[in-house]
Amino acid sequence: MESSPLISAGLPVALFIIMIGIGMTLTARDFRQVAVYPRGIVVGTIAQIVLMPLVAFALAYIFSVSPAIAVGLVIIAACPGGTTSNLFVLLARGNIALSIVLTVTASLITILTLPLFANLALQHFMGTEENISLPVGKTIGMLVGIVLFPVAIGMFVRTRKPELAKKAESVVSIFGGVVLAVLIVALIFGVRDQLWDLLKQAGPSTIMLNVDRYCAGAVGRA
């Protein structure tokens, strides 16, 4: 499925705005707390980088999915939590600073680990191998442009206009919820002709993968 202009062009802009709003909810102290108590970073990174791909391999065997679905499941599991994960954390009233740090660290590490797991999946399930690599410069540029820079803008605004930042939190939550809803609808619409078949083939294993992600996150917060 090709990305529609709504997703490829509109989503980065929307995420930039959302991350500015998220930055307005944060202070340097929030990130200092994450650094002083690094358990969440360690557990979260290991879970994203190592545990999830291994779980995906296991689920592919348990549910006997097709080779193509199995490879896709492993690749999804090996991907880091993207910018939208920070939005989910905001809506869930979670630790946003920790989420942002995990987004950055996991994204940098998966430059190396994602091609590794993708090739392992191709070898195991399809008996083939590809020369897979991720663009280092583009990845770092995306992290700076859509995560770090707008968050820094938001934090700066909070230091100058604390009242404005306080009012912005509810607006960002509403706007973020609308963006997520539009994104989900657009993705479903894009595969509407294949939706039922995809749900039958990949639904159970994908649901279990998400349940495992949730459980890993709960352990990390405990």
Image (tube, rainbow, N blue to C red):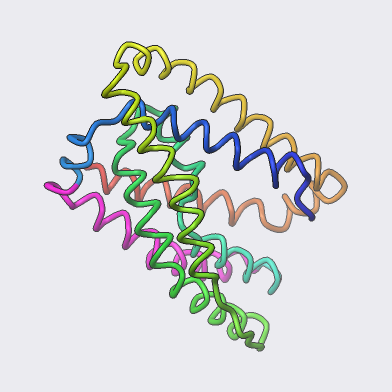
- Residue at the image position 44 percent from the left and 69 percent from the top: 54
Q: Quadrant of residue 124?
A: bottom right
Q: Residue 191: image x %, image y %?
A: 80, 48
Q: Does the magenta stretch mainly form a helix, a strand or a loop? A: helix
Q: Is residue 78 left or right of residue 156?
A: right
Looking at the image, which is closer to me, 215 or 123?
123
Q: Quadrant of residue 67?
A: bottom right
Q: Residue furthest left?
A: 36
Q: Compared to 167, does 204 lie above or below? A: below
Q: Residue 203: image x %, image y %?
A: 66, 51
Number of numbered discs overlaid on the protein picture: 0
Would residue 81 be counted in the magenta stretch? no
Would residue 57 be counted in the magenta stretch? yes
Q: Compared to 92, does 2 lie above or below? A: below
- Residue at the image position 61 percent from the left and 85 percent from the top: 131
Q: Quadrant of residue 98?
A: top left
Q: Residue 97: image x %, image y %?
A: 30, 39
Residue segment shown in magenta: 35-64
Quarter of the picture containing the N terminus is bottom right
Q: Is residue 76 left or right of residue 33?
A: right
